[in-house]
Amino acid sequence: MELLLSLEPDLVMAQEFFAGGTTLDQLQTAGVTAVLNGDYADTSPLGQAEWGKYVSLFFNTEAEASDVFAGVAERYEALTVLTAGVEERPTAIAASPYSGTWYMPGADSTIAQLIADAGADFLFADQPGTSVPLDFEVVFERGAEAEFWVNANQFWATTEQMLADDSRFEGFAAVANGNVWNNNKRMNANGGSDYFESGAANPDVILADLISIFHPDLLPDHERCTTSGSARHSSDNRAVRVGDALPGLLFDKDIAHEPAGEQRRTGIRDDAPPRLTGAWDGGAQCGSHGDARP
């Protein structure tokens, strides 16, 4: 609190869970204006993005924010139309255990909706709520044969790291087939992931990434922005610090089963500036997918 007050901010935007504590009272006593932002609690991908219009009120940029959101919503809805008629919907699971409990996203989570809108069947979509604590055995029984495993664990960079946490992961088909995907392609030195920053404001980019994972034929030229392969063998000379493989991107193909040393096309210009915050424009850096194929 002392550090915050020393900055003499004109405004502090706090998350909703501070409302019941003493933090807001302390700020008010110190004469600092504080407002709440509940974007993280919104269960709709587009709903989270629309909170940008609320933030714009404090900067007198309402018209610009409305235009930006309208573009995001239009692109998102166009992508859902693209997947609405897919004949085959692959199966998927998400997340990973923490301290012995697998906190699986529930039916009301944003990732559950994103997976569904991307044309896949989330195997735990029948579980109510946003996060469901489950035993490993429960997840394994239902999800062992899932074709894809997304948003696995942002701190896994190699297969060895994954199996060191729990050797039972080897029994998942997604691990054996190299279909583990992580939302950790753009991370800072402190472990912060831009998936939860820019991604929250640009769900259309995340959706396009997931479509290119589940149905690559629909977006054959798409350059992923939000996911990194989580299961690279340490013998692969590209298994460097998470986020280094494709600078400036967020989602990328799991490369556990690709030949070591093979050069991949990144879609990134050598002179491209870092784009770690703010809206993506669907340009050369990422998010560009060329002509969609119905």
Image (spheres, rainbow, N blue to C red):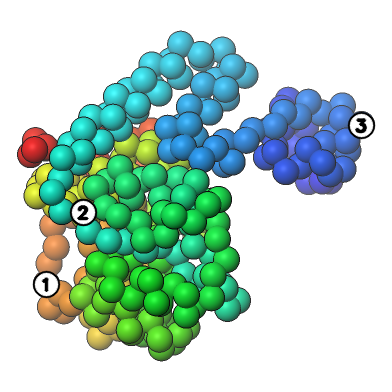
Instruction: Select label 2 or label 3 by which is in front.
Output: 2
| Quarter of the rendering containing residue 266 | bottom left
Nearer to the camera, 274 or 193: 193
The residue pinned by badge 2 equals: 89
Q: Residue furthest front?
A: 126
Q: What residue is drawn where x is 46% and y is 50%?
A: 107
Say if residue 165 shows up in the picture: yes
The residue pinned by badge 3 equals: 29
Determine the secondary structure under disc 3.
helix
Name the kind of residue labelled 1 in the image: Glu
Query: Height in image: 17 above or below 125?
Result: above
For mark 2, does the 10 Å Cα neighbourhood hold few (<14), some (14 to 19), or many (20 or more) residues? Answer: some
Whichever of callouts 2 and 1 sits on the residue coming sooner in the sequence is 2
The residue pinned by badge 1 equals: 262
Q: Residue furthest right?
A: 29
Q: CA distance from mark 2 to mark 3?
A: 55 Å
Determine the secondary structure under disc 1.
loop
Q: Indicate the position of residue 9 as horizontal and vertical percent values.
A: 73, 30
User: Is residue 166 found left or right of 256 in the rendered image?
Assistant: right
Q: What residue is drawn where x is 28% and y is 73%?
A: 145
Q: Are marks 3 and 1 in contact (CB under 8 Å)?
A: no
Name the kind of residue labelled 2 in the image: Arg
Q: Indicate the position of residue 115 as horizontal and vertical percent values.
A: 33, 50
Name the kind of residue labelled 3 in the image: Thr
| Quarter of the rendering containing residue 143 | bottom left
